[in-house]
C-alpha cells in the first residue's frame, strides 16, 4: 500500500509530538507499505524507518499558501506518487481528492462555542470561515478521524449532517521510552526550577487564547493574596503567540507575581519530562482540546491533576483529576489549594496515573490508522 501523508502544518504542540511518533511506529510495524510524508521545510526527525520518505512542501506561511497546498499541491503529489490513499493529519486537505481520503480533525477551536464567544467579530468570522472549509473537507472525505470521542461530539454538535458512522475515534499514543530521555533542561529553566518554593505547579503548553493561561494567572494572583505558598512553571514563549504573550507577561509584572510565576520559555520535548518529575501538581485550564498530550504525560509521571471540567478532560483522566468549572479563576484557586491539602487524593492520583497512561500506545495508534487505511483502499468505510 502506498500512503501519502499530508502533514505540512505540523510545527508545534500536539502536532509536533504526533507526527514523528506516528511515522516511526507505522513504518516499523508495516514495513511492506510505503509512507510518503509531506512536511514543511523546517521539520526534522531522526531515525525514520527506510519505508518512510519525506517530501518537503516548502516554507508555507499564511492561510492562502496552506489552502493552495491542501487543495491542489497534495492532490498532484498523490497522483504523481500513485498513492492508494491520502491521509491528511491536520484538519484540512483536498475537497476533491484523487484517491480515497482520510482526514484527521484535531483543532477543537473551530467547534468550541465558548471559545468563539471569546473572540472579536473579525477573528470569529475568520475561524468560522476556516470551519466551513473543514466541513467541506469532512463531507468529501471517506473517513474523519478524531483522537477522542469529545472531539467527535464537538464536531457533530456543529455539523449534525455528518453521520456517526463517518467517524473513527483513534486516540493518540504515548511511549515512556520516547518521553523519558536523558536530555537535560535548558540551563535557565533548570535554575528557575531549582529555586522554586512551596507547591510546585506545572502547566505544559504553548500559548494560545483557548489555553486558559489568563485564568491560571488570575488564580495565581488569588492564591498569592491568600498566602498559599507556590511556584507556577509555564512553558510559554512570546514566539508562540506574539499578540497575546506580552499581555500575560504584563499581568505578571503588574501584580508582582515574578517570584511565584516562572515563564520558562519553550522546553524541548525530549527534556520536558524533567518538569513533570520535579512538579507537585499539574494544572490544565484549557477550554478546549482534541486530545491533551500533557494530561497523559502528567498521569504517566504520577502527577496529580487539577483540570477544567470539560468532556475531553473527563474522558482522558476519569477520576484521576480534580475538576473545576472552566473559566472560573476563583474555583481553580480553590481546587489547587484543596488538592494540595488532600494528601490521600494526591496519593490515589499518583498511584493510578501510570496505569491509565499505559492505555495509550503509539503502536496501537499506528496499527489502527494503517488498518483503517487498508479498509478504505479495499472499499471500506464510506
Image (spheres, helix red, strand yellow):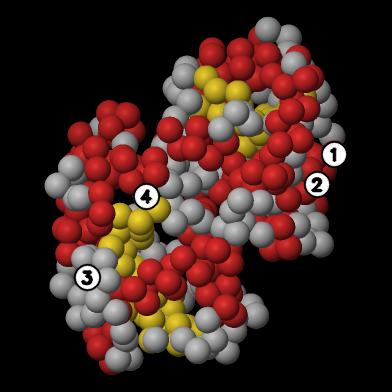
Q: Residues within 10 Å of mark 2 (few under 14, many from 20)?
A: some
Look at the numbered disc 3 and give the secondary structure of its residue: loop
Q: Residue at x 59, y 84 (%)?
A: 49
Q: Is residue 60 visible?
A: no
Q: Are marks 3 and 1 in contact (CB under 8 Å)?
A: no
Which of the image's four quarters has the C terminus? Answer: bottom left
Q: Earlier in the sequence, mark 4 or mark 2?
A: 4
Q: Is residue 16 left or right of residue 141?
A: right
Q: Is residue 357 left or right of residue 198?
A: left
Look at the numbered disc 2 and give the secondary structure of its residue: helix
Q: Which residue is mark 4?
A: 107
| Disc 3/disc 1 C-alpha distance (Å) | 49 Å
Q: Is residue 96 left or right of residue 380?
A: left
Q: Residues within 10 Å of mark 3 (few under 14, many from 20)?
A: many
Q: Which residue is mark 1?
A: 194
Q: Residue at x 48, y 25 (%)?
A: 309
| Disc 4/disc 2 C-alpha distance (Å) | 32 Å
Q: Which residue is mark 2?
A: 190
Could you tell me residue 67's position as x and y percent? 24, 66
| Disc 4/disc 1 C-alpha distance (Å) | 35 Å
Q: Residues within 10 Å of mark 1 (few under 14, many from 20)?
A: few
In the foreground, 166 or 124: 166
Q: Earlier in the sequence, mark 3 or mark 4?
A: 3
Could you tell me residue 373's position as x and y percent? 37, 73
Look at the numbered disc 1 and give the secondary structure of its residue: helix
Q: Earlier in the sequence, mark 2 or mark 3?
A: 3
Amino acid at each position: 500500500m502506498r500512503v501519502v501523508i499530508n502533514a505540512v502544518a505540523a510545527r508545534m504542540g500536539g502536532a509536533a509530538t504526533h507526527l514523528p511518533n506516528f511515522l516511526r511506529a507505522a513504518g516499523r510495524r508495516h514495513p511492506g507499505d510505503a509512507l510518503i510524508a509531506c512536511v514543511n521545510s523546517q521539520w526534522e526527525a531522526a531515525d525514520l524507518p527506510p519505508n518512510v520518505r519525506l517530501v518537503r512542501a516548502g516554507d508555507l506561511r499564511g492561510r492562502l499558501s496552506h489552502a493552495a497546498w491542501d487543495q491542489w499541491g497534495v492532490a498532484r503529489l498523490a497522483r504523481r506518487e500513485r498513492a492508494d490513499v491520502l491521509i491528511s493529519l491536520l484538519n484540512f486537505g483536498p475537497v476533491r481528492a484523487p484517491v480515497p481520503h482520510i482526514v484527521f480533525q484535531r483543532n477543537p477551536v473551530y467547534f468550541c462555542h465558548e471559545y468563539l464567544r471569546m473572540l472579536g467579530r473579525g477573528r470569529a468570522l475568520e475561524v468560522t470561515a476556516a470551519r466551513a472549509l473543514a466541513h467541506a473537507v469532512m463531507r468529501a472525505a471517506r473517513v474523519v478521524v478524531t483522537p477522542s470521542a469529545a472531539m467527535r461530539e464537538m464536531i457533530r454538535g456543529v455539523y449534525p449532517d455528518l453521520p456517526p458512522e463517518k467517524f473513527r475515534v483513534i486516540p493518540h499514543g504515548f511511549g515512556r521510552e520516547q518521553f523519558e530521555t536523558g536530555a537535560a533542561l535548558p540551563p535557565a529553566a533548570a535554575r528557575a526550577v531549582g529555586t522554586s518554593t512551596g507547591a510546585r505547579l506545572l502547566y505544559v503548553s504553548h500559548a494560545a487564547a483557548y489555553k486558559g493561561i489568563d485564568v491560571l494567572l488570575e488564580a495565581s494572583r488569588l492564591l498569592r493574596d491568600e498566602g498559599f505558598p507556590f511556584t507556577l512553571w509555564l512553558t510559554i514563549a512570546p514566539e508562540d503567540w506574539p499578540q497575546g504573550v506580552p499581555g500575560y507577561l504584563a499581568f505578571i509584572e503588574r501584580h508582582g507575581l515574578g517570584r511565584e510565576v516562572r515563564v520558562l520559555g519553550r522546553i524541548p520535548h525530549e527534556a520536558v519530562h524533567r518538569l513533570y518529575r520535579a512538579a507537585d501538581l499539574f494544572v490544565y485550564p484549557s477550554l478546549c482540546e482534541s486530545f491533551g498530550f500533557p494530561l497523559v504525560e502528567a498521569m504517566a509521571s504520577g502527577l496529580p491533576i487539577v483540570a477544567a471540567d470539560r468532556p475531553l478532560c473527563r474522558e482522558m483522566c476519569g477520576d484521576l483529576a480534580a475538576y473545576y468549572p472552566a473559566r472560573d479563576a476563583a474555583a481553580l484557586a480553590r481546587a489547587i489549594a484543596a488538592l494540595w491539602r488532600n494528601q490521600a487524593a494526591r496519593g490515589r492520583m499518583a498511584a493510578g496515573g501510570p496505569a491509565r497512561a499505559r492505555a495509550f500506545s503509539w503502536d496501537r495508534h499506528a496499527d489502527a490508522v494503517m488498518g483503517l487505511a487498508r479498509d478504505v483502499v479495499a472499499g471500506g468505510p464510506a
